[in-house]
Image (spheres, rainbow, N blue to C red):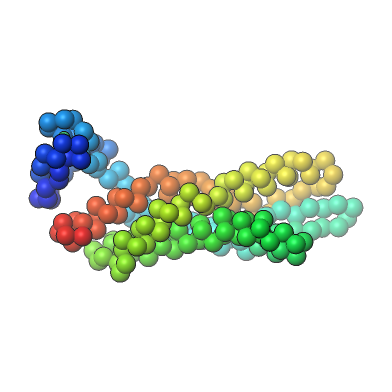
Amino acid sequence: MTRQLIACEECDVLHRRVALNAGCAAHCTRCGAELFRSRAFHIDTVLALTLGSLVVFVIANAFPIVTLEMKGVRNGSTLFGAIETLYREGRPIECGLVLTTTILLPLTELMILLYLLIPLRQGRLPARFRLYLRVIQAIRPWGMIEVFLLGVLVSLVKLSSTASILPGVALWAFAALTVLLAVILMFDPRHLWDLAEELAGGHA
Ligand SMILES: [Zn+2]
């Protein structure tokens, strides 16, 4: 049990923080507003999901997403290959958008999560904790791997009448990555604030 005080955001009544069971919330005794919620996650779970996502991310980018076979000619492309093609065809804006939303931002979020979670798990507060947490919260809405996957699937269905399509390893990896990232998204980074506060004894 931690002995911190917490003020109600609605009416300023001070309450003593108590340990909650998983999934429970504490409410103000005067006005009934929610004071805080228990963490419905374990830091090891988020860390494992993050590490798993990074491995799947590498697989998704290292192998062809799909191989098209048309009149005996096979042509496969990785995500990065497709981005390069966009650039060579004189579409720098599309190239930048795809590169940012499918590679740079998801990778940045996973790396920052890893950077924050490993020291926190060991009971240390990582340097520039607040800054990195804000960065995660800012870039989160811009990772769009699921939109990309949906686009690939729609294109494949359209192409299936003119070419034979062999799904590549990366297509499955992107599907797995979409699920993993969705689970990580259920984890609210604000819980890391609570954890950091506990570590700093209420002075973070
Ligand atoms: Zn209140």
For the question of whether residue 122 can be seen, the reply is: no
Q: Quadrant of residue 60?
A: bottom right
Question: Residue 164 appears at what percent x and percent y?
Answer: 81, 47
- Residue 160 at x, y = what percent? 79, 42
Residue 155, quarter of the rendered image: top right
Query: Residue lying farthest front?
Result: 11
- Percent x, y of residue 31: 16, 30
Question: If the image is split into quadrants, where does the C terminus sit?
Answer: bottom left
Residue 94 seen from this side: yes
| Residue 109 appears left or right of 63 | left
Look at 32% across and 67% down and name the residue there: 128
Question: Quarter of the image holding residue 121?
Answer: bottom left
Q: In the shown orientation, is residue 116 left or right of residue 173?
A: left
Q: Residue 3 appears at what percent x and percent y?
A: 9, 50
Residue located 35% across and 47% down the image: 188
Please, which residue is most extreme toward the top here? 31
**Tag count:** 0
- Which residue does the image show at 37% across and 62% down from the upper left? 132
Is residue 7 left or right of 71 when viewed as pictured?
left
If the picture is divided into quarters, which one holds ligand 1? Answer: top left
Which residue ends up furthest to the bottom in the rendered image? 127
Q: In the picture shown, does residue 108 fall above or below 21?
A: below
**Viewed as shown, does residue 34 lie left or right of 94?**
left
Determine the residue positioned at 71% across, 63% down.
87
Q: Is residue 159 above or below residue 130?
A: above
Residue placed most toward the observer, 114 or 13: 13
